[in-house]
Image (cartoon, rainbow, N blue to C red):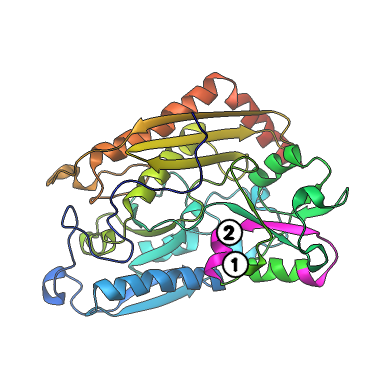
Amino acid sequence: MAEPGAAAVGLGRAGCGGATDGAGAGPLLPREENGVDGRAIRVGTRRSQLARIQTDSVVTMLRELYPDLHFEIVAMSTTGDKILDTALSKIGEKSLFTKELENALERNEVDLVVHSLKDLPTSLPPGFTIGAVCKRENPLDAVVFHPKNCGKTLNLLPEKSVIGTSSLRRAAQLKKKFPHLEFRDIRGNLNTRLKKLDEKEDFSAIILAAAGLKRMGWENRIGQLLGPEDCLYAVGQGALAVEVRAKDQEILNMVSALHDADTVLCCIAERAFMKHLEGGCSVPVAVNTLLKDGQLYLTGAVYSLDGSDSLKETMQTGVSYPHQNEDGPNDDVQHVGITAKNVPGQAQEAAENLGVELASLLLSKGAKHILSVARQLNDAR
């Protein structure tokens, strides 16, 4: 079987920019009937430029769906934004970019929060759920080169060239693929990292998510896209998530219209894979998904820190199920933290089982040992 590519195609989508087709959560009721009663809907976000752009895109879609409602953006800093002198994998906090936002959600200071899905742990705090997963942008990693290396690729860089990345996953895969290169941590938001690259001679190139560069309007800085043969991507990479209070039915119904069915199924499989492995940013875990002709393909891999030891497998399952109106207690069933009323429940179950089964397969082949050693070595660095 051919290894899955990066795109997700196939199932009919609930839509990231349009109303649902009537199956599942329908349009929000008029103000006087939906419980929000004309008050502003407060949307929490991180302060970074990329986070604001991502949040603005979600709010724009909500305004198009619900023109009678008023949305107000509330920006705040998170732990991950404040600690910039330590590698992400060394901080030891699972909710680096989400904790402060979730605290505000819990205190009813905001009604929903927009995240990069890859920042959300596979187990959410009690009382929260991912109420929407928007259509995924390109999930691949991208290489941005120092101006002096413009036109080159990683394999053409000189021996001992230094590549900046804060991701153990990227470094582990690329060390094995490009042994002539050196990899060094680089922190900060996209603006900061690009400035470090351009204005200093410390790095020959840096690795970033292609999705973030595109959303910032910096697609022209991408010198090389890393396909699955070079670098599998992070769980949830390229997708935006809307986190809400699980019991807030009005807000949950409202944001459900943003779900993209294909993205939901791919990300459920990826998150289930990660969760069953007990992985996180402190160990190199990577995925690649493809949804085509009703079949969901999941490739998952684990790596040692230097990439010399690894396990990678691909599995598939059918996810072509009709939508059934499931009124009652099953409406709000979560799959790896995601509540998707307008995506067939059987398809979600199949996607979650696929992730668990693939993780179980890797664990049976020794993944736990690889990840344990990687975690210990990372802690000792």
Q: Is residue 194 left or right of residue 4?
A: right
Mark 1, residue position: 219
Q: Is residue 198 above or below residue 367?
A: below
Residue 30: x and y, percent?
14, 74
Is 365 a magenta residue?
no
Between residue 106 and residue 135, name the one nearer to us.
Answer: 135
Q: At 12% across and 47% down in the image, what residue appears?
A: 327
Residue 48 can be seen in this image: no
Residue 210 has which mark?
2
Which residues are the magenta region?
198-216
Is 201 a magenta residue?
yes
Question: How far apart are the two marked residues, 2 and 1, measured between alpha carbons?
Answer: 8 Å
Quadrant housing residue 311: top right
Which is more N-terminal, label 1 or label 2? 2
Residue 350: x and y, percent?
32, 34
Residue 148 has which mark?
none
Residue 265: x and y, percent?
36, 44
Q: At 36% across and 78% down in the image, what residue appears?
A: 72
Q: Dot 1 surroundings within 10 Å: few (below 14), some, or many (20 or more)?
A: some
Farthest top residue? 364
Q: Amino acid at mark 1?
A: Glu
Q: Is residue 93 above or below residue 188?
A: above
Of the 4 image quadrants, the one containing the C terminus is top right
Q: Amino acid at mark 2?
A: Ala
Say which element carries label 2: helix
Say which element carries label 1: helix
Circles 2 and 1 in contact, beta carbons < 8 Å:
yes
Between residue 55 and residue 215, name the one nearer to us.
Answer: 215
